[in-house]
Amino acid sequence: MEKDYLYYKNNVSTKPDSSLIHLQNALKLNRSYKDKNWEADLTYGIGYCYFTIQNYKLAIENFEKAIRLADEIGNQNILGKAYNQIGVTYSIQNKTKIALDYYHKSLKITENREEYNDNTISVLGNIADLYIMQKDTVNARRYYQMAKQLGEKEDKKLNLAVVYNNMAVSYMTSNKDSTEFYLIKAINIYKNTGNTYGQIRAQNNLATTILNFNSKIDFPKALSYLNESLRLSNESNDIEAEYFTNFYLGNYYEKADIDFRKALDYYNKAYDLIKEGFNNESTVELYKRLSKTYFELGDFNQAYRFQSIQHKIQDSIFSVEKNKEFIETLTKFDVERKNNQIQLLNKEKEIQRASKRLIFIVSILLIVPLILLAVFYKKRLVYQKTISRQDKKLFEIEKETIRQQNLIKGQRQERSRIAKELHDGVGGKLSAINIKMDQLNTTNIQNDELKECIGQLQDTAKEIRLISHALNDSELSEIDFVDLLKQLTKDYKLFFSGDIHLNVFPVEKFGRIDDYRKHFLYRVIQEILSNSIKYSEARNINIDCTFDDRYRFIVEDDGKGFDIGNVKLGMGLNNIKKRVETMKGVLHIDSSEGRGASFIIEIPENGEFKN
């Protein structure tokens, strides 16, 4: 029986199925001994095996049975562990309120009892994980810090490794140095203790951190970590680790090497594991990456298919009502926990506080009103100053917006006037001169040089008409935005010896752009395209229009490029910048001498970006 239990302890992370069989055999042997402590331990272990193989229903059934057995015999260790593990199981299933209730029960049993510090560290870390799910890193780090201090005090290495890994995750998007510091500590512990399961996850997190902060000098290190993780996950037959490692390798080749074909190979390997039965909430990110990769490779049908799957899953992951319920439960838990701590302190200091109570109450009655009055007055002053600053800032923003809108309105009126003059005046006269010269040459002169001049005059008349159409805003309101872009690229191909490629996806989304933004966006793309043809000496110009939660326009060429730091904002670039700002959008310019230029424009769908 002891051998079966030892096998489970050493192999449950990598061989949960065989560990389950050993525990079931041990449970059968224990029937003759009728040892309740062994029965509780073995039942808890069976629940943990089912948890590891993601059979959560049977896991919870066995954990609850272990709780009943442990309660009968007063086994506090199994009680605390089982409540904690049920909390973890519900947390994975996104039932955060139920999870927190079980964590609370576990903490009541083991907190402030040194012999159960392993479980207390685990529960504190799990509560911190719930705060991470709510993107509340301040409270998350508070609980991680409590777990860390307790683990370092007791030298609980495996518990510390988990806490270090999770603390690193809380810094992963804000502080590269802190993230690397805690992850390296976690990796060293996992390697020294032979914990392959933890080592893989910590290495994957470190590789992801390098990619997130675009630390190019560390890219080879990131790839080395990921390849080692893939080898370890294959050797240990860890499906979850294999899935995430393939996903992060796809992410590496997409971001670091810009090799979308290789990235797609790894993403598809991860997707194959989903089709074989692997299930995790993070799969929604895989569908998002698959959609983007297929789009970059030009397979728009597959891109749209995976984007639809992604949106369908996102809608069902975490409702607003669940989030509200979770926050209320967290608040209640923190209050109850602090109350318990206060009651414990009160019992320890009751005699000492009794003699000072009267003086304390009198002091409070005198001091508190004065403090509250001072705080109220100070806060009121700060509030008034803040309101004044905000009102002034809003006034300036509104004033600048009106000025820009009036400026653009005046530009539009002037463009329309110039367009009419060019079309009706200059264009008409050029056409009349062309007809007269053509008649003279045909009937009387018949001179080759005059014929060439007539051809040049015809080309000039065409260019005048093109400029007139480009300047005339009245046509923009009448034509669909996608058709406008197609006509724009067609017109400019007449004067460009290279190729202009236009990609719009999804087309129907861009077809619904309102006239206000349609005008601005058309002028912005027209200005960028004109500058590229005039100055870049490019052979290819690509215009990509996409939409996820915002409109995104990418115009790039393979020309000679320019130094962004030295280039001055001329009238053209200044107009582009002001038009984008008027639409509350963001403009990114990426270029350097010798490697072309990229203009990336992001416009919110409804006036502001979503978080």
Image: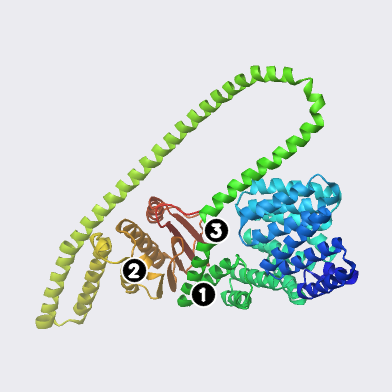
Left or right of 356 on screen, residue 171: left
- Dots 3, 1 in contact, CB < 8 A: no
Left or right of 548 on screen, residue 404: left
Q: Nearer the viewer, mark 2 or mark 3?
A: 3
**Three-letter amino acid code at the position of disc 3:** Phe
Q: Give the SS element for disc 1.
A: helix
| Residue labelled with disc 1 | 294
Residue 154 in the image: x percent, y percent? 86, 49
Q: CA distance from mark 2 to mark 3?
A: 36 Å
| Residue labelled with disc 2 | 482
**Three-letter amino acid code at the position of disc 1:** Tyr
**Above-or-below relation of 585 to 253:** above
Residue 423 in the image: x percent, y percent? 19, 64
- Dots 2, 3 in contact, CB < 8 A: no
Badge number at residue 318: 3
Q: Nearest the camera: 169 or 468?
A: 169
Q: CA distance from mark 3 to mark 1?
A: 27 Å
Q: Nearest the camera: 149 or 86?
A: 86
- Dots 2, 1 in contact, CB < 8 A: no
Badge number at residue 215: none
Counting residues from the start of the chain, the first of labels 2 and 1 encountered is 1
Q: Give the SS element for disc 3.
A: loop
Residue 173 visible, this angle = no
Residue 87 visible, this angle = yes
User: In the image, what residue occupies the spot 12% across and 81% down?
Assistant: 445
